[in-house]
Image (tube, coloured by chain):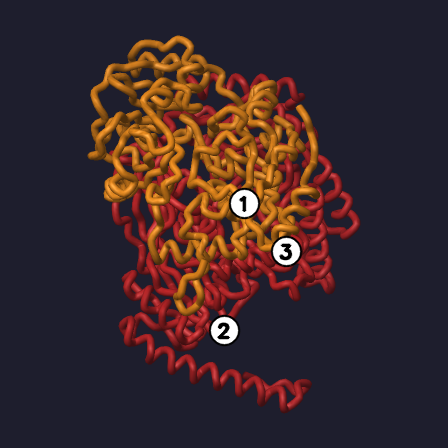
Chain colours: A orange, B red
Amino acid sequence: MTSKDDSAALLERVNEACREKSPLRIVGGNSKKFLGNAVEETQTELSIAGHTGIITYEPTELVVTVRAGTPLKELNEALNAAGQMLPFEPPEFGGSTIGGVLACGLSGPRRPFFGSARDYVLGMRVINGQAQDLSFGGEVMKNVAGYDVSRVQVGAWGTLGVLLDMSMKVLPKPAKELTLRQSSQAHASHEFASLLRQPLPLSAAMLVDDSRYLRLSGSDTAVDAAAAKLGGDVVTNDDQLWASIKDHTHEFFTQGIQSHGGESSLWRISVADYVPAIDLDGEWLYDWAGAQRWLKTSESAERIFDAVAQHGGHATRYTANEDPSQPAFQPVKDPMRRLQSRVRDSFDPHRLFNRGRFHPEFDHVDAPDGAVSV
Amino acid sequence: MSANPSVPLAEILETSDILADRQQRRERHAIALQAIVPEEAILSTVEQLRPYESDGLTAMKATPLLVVLPDTIDQIQAIMRWAKSNEVPVVARGAGTGLSGGALPHEDGIILGLAKFNKILELNEELGFARVQPGVRNLAISDAARPHGLYYAPDPSSQIACTIGGNVAENSGGVHCLKYGLTVHNVLSATVVTIDGDIMTFGCDGHDNEGYDLLALLTGSEGMLAVTVEVKVKLLPVPPVAKLVVAAFDSVEAAGDAVGEVIAAGIIPAGLELMDKPAIIAAEAFAKCGYPTDAAALLLCELDGLAEEVDAQVAGVSEVFSRCSVTSLHVAESEEERLLLWKGRKSAFPAVGRLAPDYYCIDGTIPRKQLSYVLQRMDEMSAEYELPIANVFHAGDGNLHPLIMFDAGKPGELHRTEELGSRILQLCVEVGGTVTGEHGVGVEKINEMCVQFDENTLTQFHSVKAAFDPEGLLNPGKAVPTLQRCAEFGAMHVHHGELPFPELERF
């Protein structure tokens, strides 16, 4: 693994952008270029890909500290060699970096049972929009000194700062994993709820077509006992199945979706697991025990946002589309928008980072009199 | 007020002017607030205000202008709008059990008491959540959920009294947080009222919300950003089996190494606690729970889950401890014995309180691998200052609670103790740790923040605060020091073993 501290150069680049008030688009492995709103190509690219390497990793501390540009694949290999893992099972879209994973706040099938990317972040070193090199949190699991800025950076799409280094809690890999396939009808409300209320060693639960897949993780005896209780067919090569769901290489994700204004787009819908089937046309895959739903549809963004909002959830477009009337993220309304915009302001007053990529409505600065300027 | 002959007359007059002015504002504000809440929900006399002068950090006291006890969210919104337009500081308060002075009143502000918000609004056993008002006690949630086979995981030792609103403000942990996480990992959403009087919800019923994760920012923000008025918490299935392994070692280093080996073996215990010899002897004398008093260090290792999983893990940790030169190994044979063995650990603080007239409690976290070094340095400092130290340690997550024993009656001893406490916290930061693992900064550790964070980072914290509360009216002066203030350290002072709320189990 290459190891290089590129932070001084990155800091200088941000400093320069800050002086010139010139916006930057932050890039890691560029594996998630299709995600989020299209950004003007005139924005200067700031690549963190050269800032790489594991800074410290001691398995008995359950903590790894790594530079943002480290490829996820390499990090996973290093953890795997020590019998450990990132418990949030982040997706790998081909060249993904850990910085990109955390900036986009992406978690995989294990999420409802083990927690999300933000749950495992302990500390972060960040360059804010005033070109200051700041460190929040630390390398310890319990730390209540100062606001929990590291966790807020997760899923902020770089709009609160350039992520430099991150410390995460890791966990031992389970002794055994086993996946069961059960026949199941289309998603019914509370489909997974009764399973989730039992002390079962579940680590993934999804529904696709007419099959429900349940993954169990733990000691040999505990997994076998739970499998006997739940029943179903044991899935061979289940590692590949879950990787294909996580990394979007499963045929559900690879077929019947066209990008750039094509017929059908892929949407991620985040709702409570017990929300009934949502009235939107298309093909559905239910992951996270029903809390993360994938929809292939030709419905308009507006219609999707409305339908999902009625169930208290939100939708994200997963197919590139440059039409500004088809935003990638569910727009946030006042007074929440005003507050979130002020939070962006507190980190990036000049709106240098990833302008337009995340929620463009946070890119506006509210004047005290309520007027909005860009 | 009694006149002090050494104080110049002009100063006394000035002080009495301030007091007279405060009394005027107290009366004026009380009348104004009667338009929002009933008269009996406003406390304004000296007798009424006294119980609110401090929280669990009783060494610090201040009298608020008023205590207001609303019982609807509408009232809270109206109070916040009133406070903003009149520039009156607001300090929210739950049960007042916090140990860092987070709910210490502001002399020119009001206490917003949330005690009347004590209802569990919904307990949904089918969908696994509880929707509660902020004044509901932590343990009351688990008590209500347990008949349905569910519970709320974070279990701070003061859980019988502390409220969920306070838990959100402090990001409370508990002895089981290595496996089950902190408050931030177990709250689904929090509904807050901002200083503008707006009501909004951070988090949602799904696993993430649109925009920034403000729930993460709110949790542990010590009442600086918004007032929490409703919380939705996750309920987990009660583990069918819990077993406790007690292992004795002839050195703290050996016990510390054993902790690392358990983790290396791929086992995450539900709880993993370490006590050193002074703490073992004190706890055994107090609780008579059967600890081996000849041991130099004791590990309490709890494993929970399915019977099959727990059996495998008990065998696993027993094997690890045997490899790590354990001097005695015991698995609690009954539920009664398991609880008794925990009682010893949980009463370590009052137990130490009986050994010396006073003690200081420190709350730092260190990387676990630094334990031996930190303990050795503390031994040296203890000898240098001639003050004994007992140690209890949440070994699984590196949270260290050294207890410095001293006698405030001896001239200079309190000062020496404070200095020693300062140096221990400095040591925690020096080895890569933090000045507070779970008690919060409050007013108590406001100065120590300067050691942990540089100027730019502190300034960024102030900017975050300003995004929510530009005028700085919510809990002013807490959690993040102004740059001018960065000077010295503090620690919890316990006089004659008198813990605030002595009936509570601690830490």
> Residue A273 location, x and y as percent?
29, 33
User: Which chain's residue wears label 1?
Assistant: A
Q: Amino acid at mark 2?
A: Glu
User: Seen in the image, is A258 located left or right of residue A240?
Assistant: left
**Dot 1, how many residues are within 10 Å of its Cα: few (below 14), some (14-19), or many (20+)?**
some
* Residue indicated by mark 3: A19
The residue that appears at 51% across and 66% down in the rendered structure is B476
Q: Which mark is residue A43?
A: 1
The residue that appears at 36% across and 23% down in the rendered structure is A253
Is mark 3 in CB contact (under 8 Å) with mark 2?
A: no
Q: Which mark is residue B107?
A: 2
Which of discs 1 and 3 lies nearer the camera? The answer is: 1
Up-down relation of residue B292 to residue A340 (above or below): above
Q: Amino acid at mark 3?
A: Arg
Q: Are marks 3 and 2 on the same chain?
A: no
**Dot 2, how many residues are within 10 Å of its Cα: few (below 14), some (14-19), or many (20+)?**
some
